[in-house]
Image (tube, rainbow, N blue to C red):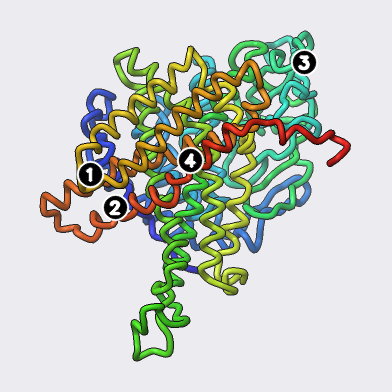
């Protein structure tokens, strides 16, 4: 197994140089989040991720989570690493000051998420799901609920889960059967079975706070009848201490392809005591607060998987000698050349890296928009930022996880046959990466969320705002001869994206199947254009640093090369993607169901 090294220099480049967070810092009330402080956060979090958490990755895969008599135990070292994570304060990075959090920007927290997710996907899920639960309670909970649960959850002393799926109801939540009966004292008796509940039972924290979707006795049919409830593993006394064990338990663990140390539970609620959060029948809206946070987090998981795969494959490629360069021996004193002389190996590595670094830019930008949404004093700026975050969330979730899995597979391929051998660790990355394309809404669901909801909300307000951002970047690059080829590729893709958007707007009502058939290709077109635009910003920043005589010549010189590679290999797909979007659904829907 190769080592993992947190990419702290590149993260600093994203935050402090490309996105120029310092210009917004005081406006958003993050006076303490100076560039030096942010760099220190990346450095210290990176040490824990690299030196403590990552060495447990293969151990977790080999040992997995185990269930005995209702108790889930985790691999050796997991809890100790989690305790170090909590004690160092990294768990509270996301949370607001008033609940014991560090109050750092989302922009910083998202990139720290990438580090820990890359270091050990299974391990980090126990924390990342909690961050989503915290956001839901912070948004929808009463003052009493916030005071009771958030101080302990913000530090991961208590962890959190989301309970949506049931054996008969996955994406179609309107079919759920879990019931909530009033107890007469303000609490409810929750009865039902939930499946695929990540981290539903474990030993990492003192308490587990489940957010459960259920229906009240008088609930309307469908999704309009869903409510959300806080259902803790241990009831919480008025003084904040833990009371008796609630009537819920883990019935079984799923046996999975990957993330084996993340306990994926069947949870049985047997009249468990729960507390309504948000309005009656308003549970879906409340849960989407958590799901949207989770979807961004899952997108970052995909990015993290590709980042880890790149580091593993590059480490191997630098050591492996095999064959000779097509232009003649490069290392004649050895029996063969390093495999980095082969264009195909370089192309695989650059495919992964150009996605990772470009994706990190888009993830950082989106997280900064989250900060604007929550903290900017101007209402119009907050609304605009919220629109952009909503628009980009399905794009990031789907494209990043698709490319994360692709990157994991390309990383394996660089090893040749060794990539298929467990001891090298590359095959685990691919197995772990695969789930991110499916949970928190499959990537097909994300595509339909984009074209069926996000594009045309409020008369297309979000897409107009984001397209304006893209136009400004393209205008800034248009006058630069040093990036002319990249700018022209991205400009052409932007034209295709605008054409595809107009096509979908016209098809939405008259031919809805055309909307569905083009959704996945449209999302990818949107993504390669968005990431390509971010690469333009990064390349301009790097070129300016080089022109200013920066001592980090190698670091900055790589950025325009990667931007050009992304434009050539990803952005250039725009014409074929547009053609597929505009093909329509006639052929797809032509066969009768019986013909399948």
What element does badge 3 sit on? strand
* Kind of element beneath mark 2: helix
- Residues 295 and 113: in front is 295
Element on which disc 4 rests: helix
**Is tag 1's residue or tag 2's residue first in the polypeptide sequence?**
1
Residue at image location 51% in from the left, 55% down from the top: 407
Q: Where is residue 397 shown, x and y percent of the image?
A: 53, 38
Query: Which residue has dot 3 on it?
Result: 181
Mark 4 nearby-residue class (10 Å; few <14, some 14–19, many ≥20): some
236 on left or right of 337: right
**Up-down: is 13 above or below 178?**
below
Query: Which mark sits nearer the N-terminus, 3 or 2?
Result: 3
Q: Nearer the viewer, mark 4 or mark 1?
A: 4
Check whether the beta carbons of the residues at disc 1 and disc 2 lie within 8 A of each other.
yes
Report the residue at 84% width, 41% height from top: 596
Residue 575: mark in rendering? 4
Mark 3 crowdedness (10 Å alpha carbons): few <14, some 14-19, many ≥20: some
- Residue 559 circle label: 2
Query: Mark 4 or 1 closer to N-term?
Result: 1
């Amino acid at each position: 197994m190769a080592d993992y090294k947190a990419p702290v220099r590149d993260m600093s480049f994203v935050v402090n140089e490309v996105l120029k967070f310092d210009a917004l810092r005081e406006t958003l009330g993050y006076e303490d989040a100076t560039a030096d402080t942010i760099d220190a956060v990346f450095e210290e979090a990176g040490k824990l991720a690299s030196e403590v958490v990552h060495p447990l990755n293969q151990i977790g895969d080999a040992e997995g989570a185990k269930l005995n008599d209702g108790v889930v135990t985790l691999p050796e070292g997991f809890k100790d690493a989690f305790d170090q994570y909590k004690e160092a304060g990294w768990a509270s990075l996301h949370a607001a000051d008033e609940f014991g959090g560090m109050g750092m920007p989302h922009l910083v927290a998202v990139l720290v998420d990438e580090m820990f997710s890359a270091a050990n996907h299974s391990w980090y899920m126990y924390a990342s799901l909690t961050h989503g639960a915290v956001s839901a309670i912070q948004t929808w909970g009463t003052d009493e609920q916030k005071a009771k649960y958030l101080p302990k959850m913000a530090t991961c002393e208590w962890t959190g889960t989301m309970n949506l799926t049931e054996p008969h109801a996955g994406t179609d939540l309107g079919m759920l059967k879990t019931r909530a009966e009033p107890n007469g004292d303000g609490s409810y008796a929750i009865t039902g079975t939930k499946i695929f509940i990540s981290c539903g039972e474990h030993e990492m924290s003192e308490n587990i706070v489940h957010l459960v979707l259920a229906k009240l006795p008088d609930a309307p049919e469908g999704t309009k009848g869903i409510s959300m409830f806080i259902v803790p593993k241990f009831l919480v006394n008025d003084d904040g201490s833990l009371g008796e064990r609630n009537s819920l338990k883990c019935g079984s663990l799923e046996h999975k392809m990957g993330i084996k140390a993340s306990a994926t539970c069947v949870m049985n609620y047997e009249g468990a005591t729960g507390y309504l959060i948000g309005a009656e029948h308003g549970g879906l809206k409340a849960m989407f607060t958590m799901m949207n946070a989770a979807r961004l987090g899952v997108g970052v998981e995909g990015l993290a998987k590709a980042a880890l795969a790149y580091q593993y494959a590059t480490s191997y490629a630098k050591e492996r000698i095999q064959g000779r360069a097509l232009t003649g021996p490069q290392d004649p004193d050895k029996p063969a050349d390093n495999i980095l002389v082969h264009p195909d190996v370089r192309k695989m590595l650059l495919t992964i890296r150009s996605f990772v670094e470009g994706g990190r830019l888009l993830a950082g930008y989106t997280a900064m928009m989250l900060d604007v949404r929550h903290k900017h004093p101007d209402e119009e700026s907050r609304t605009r930022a919220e629109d952009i975050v909503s628009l980009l969330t399905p794009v990031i979730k789907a494209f990043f996880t698709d490319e994360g899995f692709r990157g994991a597979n390309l990383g394996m391929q660089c090893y040749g046959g060794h990539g298929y051998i467990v001891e090298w660790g590359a095959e685990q990355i691919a197995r772990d990466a695969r789930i991110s394309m499916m949970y928190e809404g499959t990537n097909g669901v994300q595509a339909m969320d984009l074209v069926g909801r996000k594009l045309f909300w409020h008369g297309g307000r979000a897409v107009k705002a984001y397209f304006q951002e893209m136009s400004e970047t393209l205008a800034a690059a248009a006058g630069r001869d040093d990036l002319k080829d990249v700018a022209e590729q991205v400009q052409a893709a932007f034209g295709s994206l605008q054409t595809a958007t107009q096509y979908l707007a016209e098809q939405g009502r008259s031919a809805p199947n055309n909307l569905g058939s083009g959704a996945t290709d449209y999302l990818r077109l949107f993504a390669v254009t968005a990431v390509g635009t971010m690469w333009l910003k990064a390349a301009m920043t790097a070129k300016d640093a080089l022109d200013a005589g920066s001592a980090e010549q190698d670091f900055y010189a790589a950025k325009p090369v990667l931007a050009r590679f992304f434009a050539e290999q990803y952005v250039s797909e725009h014409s074929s993607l547009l053609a597929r979007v505009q093909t329509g659904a006639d052929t797809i829907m032509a066969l009768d169901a019986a013909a399948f």
